[in-house]
């Protein structure tokens, strides 16, 4: 077994490697860089479950390209459009590329109409949800992103998975304070967290997962042997109906509204998905400066809250991720040796040199 000590890589070198891997599979250079950027952004923010760890093994990336499930040179097109809305056909392309274009379209519509909403059909796994909501921040807008996914989560009182982890992200600009960035699965935890536990050979907490018989388990491998995640809230007596309901809402906006299909009827082999993106122009409602000032006041109020016993402070959504980004931009992205081995395998197969580790 390799050492479990993480191995750090320069983020720019790792992005260039990831881009070149995509190019080897026929992805145009600009699209390859976009897709690589989505994965590296996850690693920079400390969301290790959705970064380059997905590149070699997830159907939404190299395996999907290898099997022809993902079209490398896809050309997304608008199917239906109004001044403030659009339905985009992703042409079975890489989810990160399709979704970037969709969010950019939502932002452009919001700049003209005050709000832009774009739904996407015929796409694939798009990585971290907040990558797209955060695109709105540089335009002084509020961004919202959602995606559905193949079933991995049980409905409340259910035994088998019928819903995806169906994440939601909202990003909101502030003034002197850093932005508010929410990125959450509607399951009790993202499936990638279970993958990390299995990779590190650690049990998972009670309340994350049930086995194939619908019985609670701490064995992460159960997720891939007929088990399923629980909805946010975990159990009925802890209000799991709320996470269940949110997952259905995501399925409606991403799958039913776009025509991509709800989780239970998505292509589970190719990990097809539907997406939903919204951009909101703040100045369509009130002066940006006033909005920013009130956001600062709200964020500072939350950060000044008295911590409960055993905790040092109260955090606001996005703080920990942005702290991780500051560290990793300077000191490199830490990768588990198992992930590094998967990248080395791609490097050998494709003739794309893996960058030398920093340490």
Image (spheres, grey):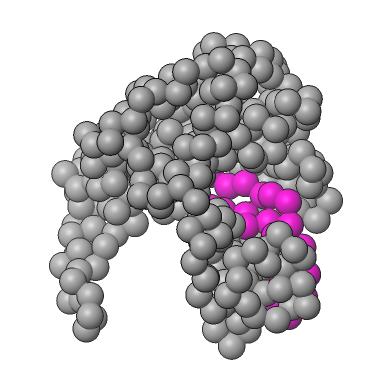
Which of the two residues, 18 or 88, is positioned nearer the viewer here?
18
Outermost residue toward the front in this view: 1
Residue at (72, 68) in percent of width and height: 227
Magenta run includes residue 208 = no
In which quadrant of the rendered view does residue 356 lie? top left
Which of the two residues, 224 or 145, is positioned nearer the viewer here?
224
Question: Considering the image in quadrants, where does the C terminus appear?
Answer: top left
Rendered position, 356 above or below 141: above
> From where the camera sits, is residue 141 visible?
no
Residue 127, how many percent across, how many down? Answer: 55, 40
Magenta run includes residue 152 = yes
Left or right: 145 as drawn, with respect to 162: left
- Would you say the magenta stretch is mainly helix, strand or loop? loop
Residue at (25, 47) in percent of width and height: 323
> From where the camera sits, is residue 296 visible?
yes
Left or right: 45 as drawn, with respect to 120: left
The stretch in magenta equals 145-173
Rendered position, 298 above or below 30: below
């Amino acid at each position: 077994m390799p050492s479990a000590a993480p191995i750090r890589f320069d983020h720019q070198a790792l992005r260039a490697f990831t881009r070149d891997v995509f190019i080897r599979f026929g992805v145009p250079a600009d699209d390859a860089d976009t897709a690589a950027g989505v994965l590296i952004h996850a690693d920079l923010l400390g969301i290790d479950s959705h970064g380059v760890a997905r590149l070699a093994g997830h159907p939404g990336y190299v395996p999907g390209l290898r099997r022809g499930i993902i079209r490398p040179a896809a050309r997304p097109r608008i199917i239906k459009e109004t001044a403030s809305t659009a339905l985009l056909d992703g042409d079975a392309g890489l989810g990160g590329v399709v979704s970037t274009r969709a969010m950019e379209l939502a932002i452009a519509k919001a700049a003209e109409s005050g709000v832009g909403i774009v739904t996407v059909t015929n796409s694939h796994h798009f990585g971290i949800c907040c990558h797209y909501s955060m695109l709105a921040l540089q335009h002084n807008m509020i961004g919202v992103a959602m995606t559905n996914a193949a079933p991995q989560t049980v409905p409340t009182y259910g035994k088998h998975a019928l819903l995806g982890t169906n994440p939601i992200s909202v990003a909101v600009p502030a003034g002197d304070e850093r932005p508010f960035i929410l990125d959450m699965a509607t399951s009790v935890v993202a499936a990638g967290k279970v993958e990390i536990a299995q990779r590190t050979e650690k049990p998972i907490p009670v309340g994350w997962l049930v086995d194939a018989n619908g019985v609670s388990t701490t064995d992460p491998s159960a997720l891939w042997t007929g088990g399923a995640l629980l909805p946010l809230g975990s159990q009925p007596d802890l209000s799991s109906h709320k996470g269940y309901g949110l997952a259905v809402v995501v399925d409606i906006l991403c799958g039913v509204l776009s025509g991509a299909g709800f989780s239970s009827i998505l292509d589970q082999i190719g990990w097809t998905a539907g997406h939903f993106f919204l951009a909101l122009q703040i100045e369509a409602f009130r002066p940006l400066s006033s909005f920013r000032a009130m956001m600062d006041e709200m964020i500072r109020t939350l950060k000044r809250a008295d911590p409960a016993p055993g905790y040092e402070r109260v955090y606001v959504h996005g703080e920990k991720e942005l702290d991780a980004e500051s560290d990793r931009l300077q000191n490199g992205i830490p990768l588990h040796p198992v992930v590094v081995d998967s990248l080395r395998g791609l490097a050998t197969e494709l003739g794309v040199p893996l960058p030398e580790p920093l340490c």
